[in-house]
Image (cartoon, helix red, strand yellow):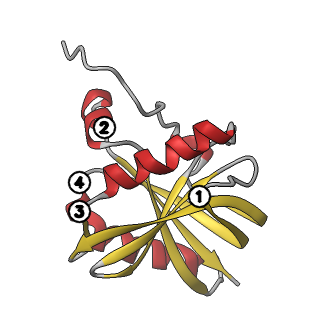
Amino acid sequence: MNKEPVCCPKFNPEHWDGKEHRWNNKKFIKGHVISFMHIPLNFGGIITRLMNKIEDAKAHDKDPIWLSDEKSLFGSDLFVSVSKDVPTAVNFEISGTFVSKVFTGSFSNMGKWITHMKEFVSSKGKQMKRMLFWYTTCPKCAKKYGQNHTVIFAETD
């Protein structure tokens, strides 16, 4: 049996699969992840730094999410939800209507998931503006839980 501690909360797909979210200035703090061909090189260090800032400011969101804006092959912006502004961080707000879909499995399926997400949004009669990705657990916790979930949020008009 794996005795390593779990650092990521257990993910419940029911709260996110096929749901619509209307955010009005939802608070996040922002970091930047260096990537090579969309493979993150310093994700762990960035998320740890952001979580420490949240801890210091006592700004934990009751339902935390961390979103990756995969805007380049060589980097992505990472947004971690917070309950209030964090003085030592880059504060950021996101507003808009998003639909979310949960995908389970290896990241090698990402191309298929993106295609499926585009089809899902289209089936709702909506136009997609952009996608944000929530990798719900770290690799160690995904292994411990026996599942790797990714939530794709599509911002719609």
Name the N-terminal-most of marks 4 and 1.
1
Q: Circle 2 is placed at which residue position?
A: 142
Amino acid on which the number 4 mark rests in the picture: Ser
Name the N-terminal-most of marks 4 and 2.
4
Find out whether the residues at labels 1 and 2 contact each other: C-beta distance under 8 Å.
no
Of circles 4 and 3, the one toward us is 3
Up-down: is 130 above or below 47? below
Measured Cα–Cα span from mark 4 to mark 2: 10 Å
Q: Is residue 17 left or right of residue 156?
A: left
Q: Circle 3 is placed at which residue position?
A: 41
Counting from the top left corner in percent of width and height, residue 136 is at 43, 47
Secondary structure at badge 3 equals loop
Up-down: is 97 above or below 86? below
Q: Circle 4 is placed at which residue position?
A: 106
Name the N-terminal-most of marks 4 and 3.
3
Q: Circle 1 is placed at which residue position?
A: 18
Amino acid on which the number 1 mark rests in the picture: Gly
Residue found 37% across the figure and 25% down from its top = 6
Of circles 3 and 1, the one toward us is 3
Find out whether the residues at labels 4 and 3 contact each other: C-beta distance under 8 Å.
no
Find out whether the residues at labels 4 and 2 contact each other: C-beta distance under 8 Å.
no
